[in-house]
Image (cartoon, coloured by chain):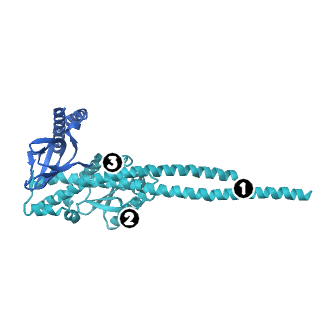
């Protein structure tokens, strides 16, 4: 059995660990609130963008030579996966969930005979995939999470993907990230960026009175549809990436908050049980000493 | 009858209220969004959006390029960047202009797409400086 001194040291060290985890929990909670606020603030832009894109896509439907961002390259050979993670750990299974889903997707695609390329975002993903699939990495972005996410990160990432696509180096691009549902729960999802999936949900969300007012009136475009579409599509790509980056930032802090809350509680529990062992040991020692004294006295 | 104006930047919604008219800096010329305007989608250059109530300009915002979606009841501006004209920082803008001119000098003069992107950016920043110094 451990000596009293050892036990005291262990209790002391767990106590300071608990201080750290509870401080991290509080920091994460504050950051989470800010991240959630900025994720919400960014939503109207994305929604308006989807609505405009829906109108435009409808207007240009059936025309030849649609931009690659919308229609893809017409092939399905090279897939680019973009896993979004945080730069720091200590946030539970947050990053490993993304890693797992990405690895599963890589295996599935490779089994189908497709070529896979990786563009990890966040230091955790970079480190992980450097070990596992270093040969697949084409590029990486780190230093994203932590502070507020600037839009320039998303636009830079969008440009990178666009360049790869225009150069014909990739055919399909998919984001892998944690969708933030609440502070306790983040669900890893795959979201296909290229070719664009026109979701009907966005069109349904359009205010009904607009449709009634607009009636049969066709949209005018200035300049023409093709130019507008060519400008809007890269922008849309950036906006979608930005939205997922914000979700990742919010999710990271949510996950860290939950993980640190658990850690704090576990520390408390181990302090309790160690204190009990400590007291019991102390009691035993006293009893032993007494027995020794008494039996010594009796022997005389 | 007023029109609902919304100016949205990627980070947040700057304006969402009812006004009588908005003048937008279209890529091919300024366009006024008024009630009952036919539906229209517009590419914006860097310039100033002026919001009118009655005949007076109540607010002026600088937008650094973007898109506008005009319907009979609504005008949504998706700006790459948007600031109230009174809050334009001329120093930052001037620094930006210098950086851009430098990039222009260095740029490959045969790469037309790169050049036209740079040109649009330079024009937008010049418009920003102009709008900012006009307000000061």
Q: Quadrant of residue B52?
A: top left
Determine the colour of chain B: blue
Of all residues, the one furthest to the right in this rendering is A300
Q: From the image, tell me which residue sits under label 1.
A: A282
Distance in Å between CA atoms under marks 2 and 3: 28 Å
The nearer-to-camera label among 2 and 1 is 1
Circles 1 and 3, Cβ within 8 Å, touching? The answer is: no
Q: How far apart are marks 1 and 3 (CA)?
A: 54 Å
Which residue sits at x=58%, y=52%? A14
Q: Specify the quadrant that holds the C terminus of chain B.
A: top left
Identify the residue at image location x=19%, y=57%: A68
Rendering quarter of residue B122: top left
Label 3 resides on the chain identified as A
Marks 1 and 3 belong to one chain: yes
Q: In the visual, does A14 lie left or right of B4?
A: right
Badge 1 density bin: few <14, some 14–19, many ≥20, Cα 10 Å:
some
In this view, the residue in front, A58 or A284, is A284
Q: What element carries label 1?
A: helix
Mark 2 Cα-neighbour bin, 10 Å: few <14, some 14–19, many ≥20: few
Q: Which chain carries label 1?
A: A
Q: How far from the left and from the top, in percent, is residue A87?
A: 41, 50
Count the numbered circles shown.
3
Q: Is residue A211 visible?
A: yes
Q: Give residue B66's position: percent from left, percent from top.
A: 18, 48
Colour cyan belongs to chain: A
Q: Give the left or right position of residue B125, taking residue A146 as reference.
A: left
* Residue corresponding to mark 2: A104
Give the label, 1 or 3, closer to the camera: 1
Q: Are marks 2 and 3 on the same chain?
A: yes
Q: Do labels 2 and 1 share a chain?
A: yes
Name the residue tied to disc 3: A149
Q: Quadrant of residue A103?
A: bottom left
């Amino acid at each position: 059995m451990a000596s009293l001194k050892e036990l005291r040291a262990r209790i002391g060290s767990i106590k300071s660990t608990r201080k750290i985890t509870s401080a991290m929990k509080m920091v994460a909670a504050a950051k989470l609130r800010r991240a959630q606020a900025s994720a919400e603030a960014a939503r109207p832009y994305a929604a308006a963008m989807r609505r405009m894109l829906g109108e435009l896509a409808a207007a240009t439907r059936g025309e030849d030579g649609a931009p690659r961002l919308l229609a893809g390259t017409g092939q399905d050979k090279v897939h680019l996966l973009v896993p979004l993670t945080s730069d720091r750990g200590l946030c539970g299974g947050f990053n490993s969930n993304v890693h797992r889903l990405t690895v599963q997707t890589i295996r599935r695609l490779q089994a189908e005979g497709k070529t896979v390329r990786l563009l990890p975002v966040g230091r955790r993903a970079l480190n992980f995939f450097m070990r596992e699939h270093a040969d697949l990495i084409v590029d990486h972005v780190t230093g994203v999470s932590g502070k507020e996410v600037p839009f320039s990160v998303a636009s830079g990432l969008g440009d990178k993907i666009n360049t790869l696509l225009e150069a014909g180096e990739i055919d399909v691009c998919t984001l892998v990230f944690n969708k933030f549902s609440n502070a306790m729960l983040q669900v890893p999802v795959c979201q296909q960026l290229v070719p664009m999936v026109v979701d009907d949900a966005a069109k349904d969300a359009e205010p009904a009175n607009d449709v009634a007012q607009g009636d049969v009136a066709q949209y005018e475009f200035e300049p023409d549809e093709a130019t507008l579409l060519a400008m809007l599509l890269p922008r849309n790509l950036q906006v979608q990436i930005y939205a997922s980056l914000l979700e990742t930032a919010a999710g990271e802090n949510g996950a860290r908050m939950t993980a640190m809350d658990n850690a704090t509680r576990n520390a408390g529990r181990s302090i309790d049980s160690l204190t009990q062992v400590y007291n019991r040991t102390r009691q035993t020692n006293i009893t032993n000493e007494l027995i020794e004294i008494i039996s010594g006295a009796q022997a005389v | 009858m007023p029109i609902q104006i919304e100016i949205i930047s990627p980070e947040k919604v700057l304006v969402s209220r009812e006004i009588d008219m908005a003048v937008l800096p279209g890529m091919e010329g300024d366009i006024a969004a008024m009630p009952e305007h036919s539906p229209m989608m517009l590419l914006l250059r860097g310039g100033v959006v002026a919001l009118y109530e009655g005949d007076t300009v109540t607010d002026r915002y600088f937008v650094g390029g973007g898109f506008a979606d005009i319907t009979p009841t609504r005008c949504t501006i998706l700006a790459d960047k948007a600031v109230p004209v009174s809050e334009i920082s001329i120093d930052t803008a001037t620094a930006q202009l210098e950086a851009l001119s430098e990039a222009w000098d260095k740029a490959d003069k045969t790469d037309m797409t790169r050049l036209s992107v740079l040109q649009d950016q330079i024009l937008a920043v010049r418009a920003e400086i102009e709008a900012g110094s006009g307000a000061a």
